[in-house]
Image (cartoon, rainbow, N blue to C red):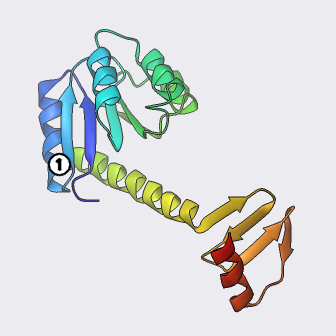
Amino acid sequence: MAGKKILVAETDPVTLRQIVYYLSRENLRAENTSTAAAALDSIRIKKYEMLIFDLHLPDMDGLEFCRRLKSESHSREIPLIVLSASGDEAQEISSLELGADDYLSKPFSPRILASRVKAILRRRIKRAQSDNLLMRINDLTLHRGRYEAWTDGARVSLTFMEFQLLDYLA
């Protein structure tokens, strides 16, 4: 997980410093901005593993920002953590329903935020590894980790050698 780039869009300098400090202690690289527009521009140019943003950025409603991030192809898959001082349950629910992966109410512990970032990144890495184990070709599905094959949704009984041969030919 070392060196993963996280974009932080936060207007409060104290909160920003704390976030950057605790992420750097976890060997994560934090870049920051204070507006939604600057965050959107950065995401178009650079690859980030996650975006942490304040729901109350000055130039765009936070829910609209979340909606835009999840609707654009270059940012759709980026995990989002929303920060908010409002404590509004409806906003928290809306953020999560729009695609945010987590939501923290201010004030929060930056150590807990760093732990949540690591947990989300860990799950994402595991999911990516799991996705690499599956191979689909037309109606044939191979699971390389379990040495299983399916065709049209039905499991095909294969020996280990037959599976390896099928995997090689696929």
Work out which residue is located at the far top of the displayed protein and give it.
59
Does 158 sit left or right of 126 as displayed?
right
Up/down of 131 relative to 68, above or below? below
Q: Amino acid at mark 1?
A: Tyr
Residue pictured at 47% horizontal, 15% vertical: 64
Q: Position of residue 105 (x, y in %)?
A: 36, 32
Q: Is the residue 31 above or below the residue 145 in the image?
A: above
Q: Quarter of the image containing the C terminus? A: bottom right
- Return the x and y of residue 65 as percentages of the image width and height: 42, 19
| Left or right side of 146 for 139 | right
Quadrant of residue 11 in the image? top left
Q: Residue at x 33, y 29 (%)?
A: 43
Quadrant of res 79: top left
Q: Is residue 102 left or right of residue 7?
A: right
Front-lying residue, 125 or 25:
125
Query: What is the number of callouts on the image?
Result: 1
In this view of the protein, which residue sits in the foreground, 29 or 13? 29
Tell me the element at label 1: helix
Above or below for 129 versus 109: below
Q: Residues within 10 Å of mark 1 (few under 14, many from 20)?
A: some
Q: From the top left corner, tell me how far across and down residue 26 is, in percent.
A: 20, 56
Q: Write down the residue under mark 1.
A: 22
Let me know if residue 108 appears in the view. Answer: no
User: Which residue is drawn at the image coordinates 63% and 64% (left, top)?
Assistant: 134
* Percent of width and height locating residue 3: 21, 54
Image quarter where the N terminus lies is bottom left
Query: Could one spot residue 50 in this view of the protein?
Result: yes
Viewer-closest of 33 and 169? 169
128 vs 8, left or right, is right
Please tell me which residue is depicted at 37% across the width and 11% down the height of the picture. Answer: 60
